[in-house]
Image (tube, rainbow, N blue to C red):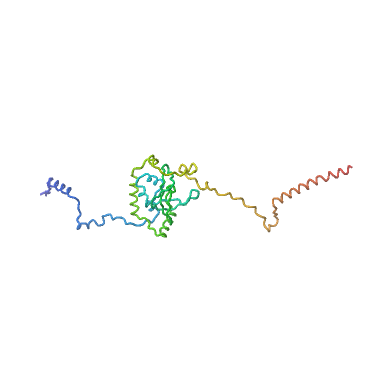
């Protein structure tokens, strides 16, 4: 005899599926033991310890220019880090890693690309807090030497470095700030109430965003040729050393002697004939 399988009616299966679909998914407290090890725990908040991690909080001059014309500029840049040149225009550049503590205003405005502004960044580096123009910020990444200098300064000044949670929060703030509507350049120019500083007279490369090599701007002085070496005190036997002037004088004496010797026979012949 063949065994016959018992099948559930199709209507009963449909009712059971509808009931399960309408019931919200719920895990009771006593049944949460099976989910241990499957939940994703939040990452711990640890200080940044490498240059690559700190690079996530770096703002370039170009990115600051994009944020400058947006409403949430101050909130976005505060707490980030920049690579700033601490020397003047006529000196060799020297860069430091600096933290943006806030904003300030200058008496004279300046041009950042095509945007007129008098906004300055209040930066902290070493044991100083200084206002810097946005034009002093570099577009290049941090170097390992600059990072080690900054890390040692944090230890000596008892400054707490940023953490991984700070990086995650600043990424969200920067993204939201860049999504804001930018003000039109014409609107910004109409609202300028400060005087603009005269533009810096520089070469054509610097006017278009380039930088001349410092070796061309500050060439090395010409090194004069060394003086001639004096003759040795005890020259080897069979060799003589004479200065160039001495050799020329000797050649002149020899030529005069030859001239006189050639004239002596002619004078004797003229005396004999007389």
Q: Nearer the viewer, residue 3 or 5?
A: 5
In the image as oriented, which residue stretches furthest toward the right? 274
Tag count in the figure? Answer: 0
Q: Position of residue 142 (x, y in %)?
A: 42, 51
In the image as oriented, which residue stretches furthest toward the front? 193
Q: Nearer the viewer, residue 116 or 19?
A: 116
Q: Position of residue 79 (x, y in %)?
A: 37, 52
Q: Is residue 27 above or below residue 189?
A: below
Q: Position of residue 197 (x, y in %)?
A: 46, 44
Q: Position of residue 134 (x, y in %)?
A: 42, 47
Is 59 positioned to the left or the right of 229 in the image?
left
In the image as oriented, which residue stretches furthest toward the top? 186
Which quadrant is home to the C terminus? top right
Q: Nearer the viewer, residue 162 or 194?
A: 194
Is 262 positioned to the left or the right of 26 in the image?
right
Is 243 positioned to the left or the right of 183 in the image?
right
């Amino acid at each position: 005899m063949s065994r016959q399988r018992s099948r559930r009616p199709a209507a009963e299966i449909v009712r059971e599926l509808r009931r399960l679909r309408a019931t919200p998914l719920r895990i009771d407290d006593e049944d949460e033991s099976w989910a241990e090890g499957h939940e994703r725990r939040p990452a711990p908040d640890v200080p940044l310890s490498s240059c690559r991690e700190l690079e996530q909080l770096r703002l370039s001059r170009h990115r600051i220019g994009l944020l400058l014309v947006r409403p949430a500029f101050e909130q976005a840049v505060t707490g980030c880090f920049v690579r700033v040149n601490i020397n003047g225009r006529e000196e060799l550049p020297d860069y430091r890693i600096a933290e943006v503590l806030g904003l300030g205003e200058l008496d004279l405005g300046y041009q950042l690309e095509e945007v007129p502004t008098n906004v300055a960044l209040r930066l902290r580096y070493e044991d100083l807090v200084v206002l810097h123009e946005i034009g002093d910020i570099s577009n290049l990444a941090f170097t390992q030497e600059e990072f080690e200098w900054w890390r040692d300064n944090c230890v000596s000044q008892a400054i707490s470095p940023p953490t991984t949670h700070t990086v995650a929060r600043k990424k969200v703030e920067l993204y939201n700030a860049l999504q804001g509507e930018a003000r039109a350049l014409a609107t910004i120019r109409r609202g300028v109430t400060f005087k603009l500083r005269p533009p810096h007279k520089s070469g054509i490369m610097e006017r278009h965003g380039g930088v001349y090599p410092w070796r061309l701007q500050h060439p090395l002085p010409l090194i004069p040729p060394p003086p001639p070496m004096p003759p040795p005190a005890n020259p080897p036997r069979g060799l003589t050393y004479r200065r160039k002037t001495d050799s020329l004088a000797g050649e002149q004496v020899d030529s005069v002697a030859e001239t006189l010797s050639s004239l002596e026979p002619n004078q004797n012949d003229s005396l004999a004939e007389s």
